[in-house]
């Protein structure tokens, strides 16, 4: 394939174009445009790239004539999961055909057209349905097929940070093209997994993206509201490609959108004035929208964004922490096995519950960042560190510091980490710099740099400065700015050298003055082997803060230390409430001594061990109604109110499912199989719904009362429910938890009436009421599991005429 239209050689590269003072225009929607031109509903638009290239070339050409500078390849839904099995052709075939269509469309247009290799999300949740590596592998064939031919990679419409990180990493590892990243955000400015736009932008920038922004969503009004948070956080160019407003249902198979070309253009002008440089459209926009936008922006010069001073920042998937904003960063040191017998045992047993509990406690005590160290000799550190990071970040919204001497373990953990990590640590040894600095660059981390090398720790401040200078210079030579280095001049113990504190603090002052970097110290080493350690630690911390310390690795559970840490701020008259500090980031009031608290906090291992203890002492059925269900109700409320996000909901569901396994086995033992053979009941959660906790409880109760349960699982199609209804089945139980899946319950009942008219149907689930159950044709409704048992007893004890709810 040729390398593009005839302007390719002489025209500025896309990276140069990004630096120019002219807006850059993307094209608009393609899927919706093709639907309006006859693409059958349900057919993937990519197919037409191969079977109807004429339509694609024409559509691309219309966008070029409308003024677009960048044309997206028609490859949004192409990835290793869908090709060739689902879409019928290989990824390479789709990508090659799509690029050819763009090239043909741009031939002879008289100006440089940039071809953007379009990569969309896989639609599978990383960490739940697929691993990070599987996501990376799914993007790989697309990147490889387009790497040498396109002008840029566009990673668009992402809502999940882990998947986005896999896509960026895959693009950066496998080609040198510039990378533009866009996410999809809701009315609250967050993705469906709770990631704020600014956080996603910070991560994309840290991983080396060339531009960041948003696309799709509810249209330009929403993006105008979110834009300031993005513009103030990222220093790379900002891109905005909205839908043409909201879809207004379907006329003749293709949806129409609320925002016409003129209105769209007017709003895009405000977005351009708000700081975006790359502008285009997504679903529902047409060549007319792009043309109107371009002419509306005629003569407008892009906003000269104040060149954002690169800041020293790290983040979790939901919040950013900036070092040096006048607040000492407290890095909680408690997730570290040194001197902790219980943590060591937990690590050997592969139990991340201890680390998760410590994470909750340190967050409640006001830590800003949590250190994660699992270094004991007898475990597979690479595996356990990655698992611990994955578990802690599910339940805790603070950014994490990953702490290991093993580069392999560091990389495994960095792949898991959903944000900008703090990497602890690199030092002045050649081996350390050559292994750690590339990791920081690839994964976008901030580094803790220790002032030691092959000769040990220099005794003088000048010696420690020299090592810090070496590390900073080496990092900068690799494109890692010094704002991403935090130097730790190392605390040695006073017991061994009475001058230790002064030497460390002297080095700290000198390094800050000469290098202008942030600094950190592990504080408690100062008092090793001394009496009254806490008093010594507090004095040292105060002195270090006076010397300009930016971050302290310390125990946030020590009230004296926290007062010293926060007292620093109160010198300016700000009053500090130690008890309340940090609690916004943790499940408020999660009491880990109760089962409901452990479920709400999402800590499975603790929930299981409490369930085991409680089952021995209490009625297991009461644990379900008194602990499990109230915890899930609370989690559901927090989710709905935006206090927790999907990863938190999933963690709580895991904890509920694990503890229910213990409780239901206790219920099974109690009933001891005394009752059997009371009849068959088919159970299912209806199609489209994956909530099965309630349905499983109903199943356990029915079994413990002697019924034979044929559990079809969750997301069960109506036909499968009918197929399970052999003539000896008299009762079917259906569960649905969402308003959107109640219609699927109605369809199942309707089909049962036709194909298994002899069965009775009982329904349940949080969204149903007796009245609603009646309107969808159910025979009975039960708000709980025991009600289902009573109804089953009734059905199997006598032959009833069709009863009504
Ligand atoms: Co989701 N979820 N969830 N969720 N989730 C709800 C249901 C929700 C109300 C939360 C909220 O926003 N407040 C909301 C639905 C909103 C609505 O439609 N009105 C919701 C949403 C939106 C979602 C997703 C779309 C989130 C997303 O991806 N953005 C997604 C849906 C995916 C899908 O199904 N297609 C989703 C996913 C999940 C998890 C996977 C994380 C997890 C489920 C894990 C699992 O089930 N294995 C989950 C959870 C745990 C919940 C909440 C928090 C708890 C549900 C639960 O298990 N309750 C829930 C909020 C809530 O209900 N408070 C929520 C405990 C359980 C024992 O109660 O199932 O009602 P329940 O069962 C009771 C009774 O209703 C009755 O007996 C049981 C015991 O007393 N009963 C029957 C149930 N079935 C019966 C059948 C009978 C008789 C009685 O006869 C046969």
Image: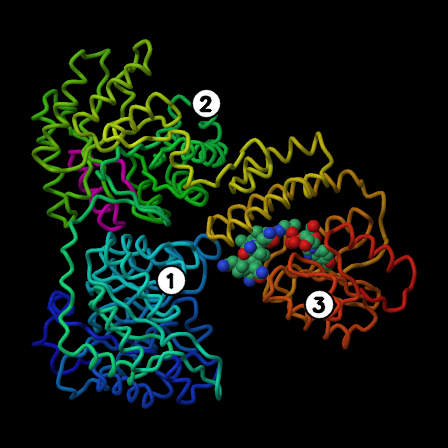
Mark 1 burial class by Cα count in 10 Å: few <14, some 14-19, many 20+? many
Q: Which residue has dot 2 on it?
A: 341
Q: Quadrant of residue 796?
A: bottom right
Mark 1 touches mark 3? (CB < 8 Å): no
Q: Which residue has dot 3 on it?
A: 721
- Queried on whether the Cβ of the residue with tag 2 lies below 8 angstroms from ligand 1, the answer reads no
Q: CA distance from mark 1 to mark 2?
A: 44 Å
Residue most extreme to the front: 573
* Image quarter hosting the C terminus: bottom right
Mark 3 burial class by Cα count in 10 Å: few <14, some 14-19, many 20+? many
Whole-percent x, y for residue 632 in the image: 59, 47
Mark 2 burial class by Cα count in 10 Å: few <14, some 14-19, many 20+? few
Q: Is residue 409 magenta?
A: no
Frontmost of labels 1 and 3 is 1
Q: CA distance from mark 1 to mark 3?
A: 37 Å
Whole-percent x, y for residue 584 in the image: 42, 41
Frontmost of labels 1 and 2 is 1
Q: Quadrant of residue 389?
A: top left
Image-based side of 188 in relation to 602, left or right? left
Please give the range of residues in magenta. 421-445
The mark found on residue 185 in the picture is 1
């Amino acid at each position: 394939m040729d390398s593009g239209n005839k302007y390719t050689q002489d025209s500025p590269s896309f990276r140069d174009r990004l630096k120019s003072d002219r807006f850059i225009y993307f094209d608009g929607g393609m899927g919706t445009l093709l639907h309006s031109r006859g693409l059958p509903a349900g057919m993937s638009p990519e197919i037409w790239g191969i079977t109807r290239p004429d339509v694609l070339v024409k559509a691309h050409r219309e966008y070029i004539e409308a003024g677009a500078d960048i044309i997206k390849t028609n490859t949004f839904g192409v990835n290793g999961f869908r090709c060739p099995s689902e879409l019928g052709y290989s990824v390479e075939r789709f990508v090659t055909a799509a690029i050819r269509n763009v090239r043909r469309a741009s031939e002879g247009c008289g100006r440089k057209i940039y071809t953007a290799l379009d990569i969309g999300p896989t639609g599978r949740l990383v960490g739940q349905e697929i691993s990070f590596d599987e996501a990376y592998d799914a993007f790989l064939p697309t990147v490889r097929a387009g790497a040498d031919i396109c002008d840029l990679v566009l990673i668009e419409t992402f809502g999940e940070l882990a998947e986005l990180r896999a896509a960026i990493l895959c693009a950066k590892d496998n080609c040198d093209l510039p990378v533009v990243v866009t996410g999809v955000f809701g009315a609250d400015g967050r993705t469906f997994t709770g990631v704020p736009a600014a956080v996603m932008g910070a991560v994309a920038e840290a991983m080396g993206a060339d531009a960041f922004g948003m696309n799709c969503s509810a249209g330009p009004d929403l993006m105008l509201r979110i834009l300031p948070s993005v513009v103030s956080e990222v220093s790379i160019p900002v891109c905005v490609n909205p839908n043409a407003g909201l879809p207004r249902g379907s006329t003749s198979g293709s949806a129409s959108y609320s925002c016409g070309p003129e209105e769209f253009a007017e709003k895009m002008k405000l977005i351009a004035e708000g700081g975006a440089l790359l502008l285009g459209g997504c679903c529902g926009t047409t060549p007319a929208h792009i043309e109107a936008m371009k002419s509306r922006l005629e003569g407008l010069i892009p906003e000269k964004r104040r060149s954002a001073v690169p800041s020293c920042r790290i983040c979790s998937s939901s919040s950013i922490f900036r070092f040096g904003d006048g607040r000492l960063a407290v890095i909680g040191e408690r997730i570290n096995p040194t001197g902790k017998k219980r943590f060591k045992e937990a690590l050997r047993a592969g139990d991340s519950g201890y680390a998760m509990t410590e994470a909750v406690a340190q967050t409640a005590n006001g830590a800003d960042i949590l250190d994660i160290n699992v270094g004991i000799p007898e475990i597979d550190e690479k595996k356990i560190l990655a698992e611990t990071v994955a578990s802690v970040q599910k339940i805790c919204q603070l950014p994490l510091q990953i702490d290991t001497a093993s580069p392999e373990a560091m990389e495994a953990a960095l792949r898991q980490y959903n944000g900008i990590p703090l990497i602890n640590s690199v030092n002045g040894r050649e081996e350390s710099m050559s292994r750690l600095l590339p990791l920081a660059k690839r994964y976008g981390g901030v580094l803790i740099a220790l002032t030691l090398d092959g000769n040990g720790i220099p005794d003088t401040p000048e010696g420690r400065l020299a090592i810090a200078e070496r590390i900073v210079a080496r990092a900068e030579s690799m494109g890692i700015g010094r704002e991403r280095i935090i130097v730790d001049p190392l605390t040695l113990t006073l017991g061994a050298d009475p001058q230790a504190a002064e030497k460390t603090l002297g080095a700290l002052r000198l390094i800050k003055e000469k290098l202008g970097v942030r600094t950190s110290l592990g504080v408690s080493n100062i008092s090793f082997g001394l009496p009254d350690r806490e008093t010594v630690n507090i004095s040292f911390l105060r002195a270090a803060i006076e010397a300009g310390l930016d971050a302290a690795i310390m125990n946030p559970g020590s009230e004296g230390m926290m007062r010293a840490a926060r007292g620093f701020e109160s010198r300016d008259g700000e009053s500090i409430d130690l008890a309340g500090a940090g609690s916004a980031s943790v499940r408020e009031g999660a009491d880990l001594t109760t089962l409901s608290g452990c479920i709400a906090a999402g800590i499975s291992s603790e929930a299981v061990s409490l369930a085991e203890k409680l089952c021995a002492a209490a009625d297991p059925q009461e644990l379900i109604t008194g602990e499990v269900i109230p915890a899930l109700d609370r989690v559901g409320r927090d989710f709905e109110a935006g206090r927790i996000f999907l990863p938190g909901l999933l963690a709580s569901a895991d904890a509920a499912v694990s503890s229910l396994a213990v409780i239901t086995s206790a219920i099974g033992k109690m009933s001891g199989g005394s009752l059997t053979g009371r009849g068959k009941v088919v159970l299912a959660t209806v199609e489209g719904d994956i909530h099965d906790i309630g349905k499983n409880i109903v199943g356990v109760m029915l079994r413990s009362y002697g019924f034979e349960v044929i559990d079809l699982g969750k997301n069960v199609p109506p036909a499968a429910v009918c197929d399970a209804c052999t003539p000896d089945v008299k009762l079917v139980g259906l569960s649905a938890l969402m308003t959107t899946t109640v219609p699927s319950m109605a369809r199942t009942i309707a089909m049962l009436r036709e194909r298994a008219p002899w069965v009775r149907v009982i329904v349940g689930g949080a969204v149903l009421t007796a009245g609603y159950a009646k309107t969808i044709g159910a025979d009975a409704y039960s708000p709980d599991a025991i009600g289902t048992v009573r109804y089953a007893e009734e059905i199997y004890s006598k032959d009833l005429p069709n009863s009504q709810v």
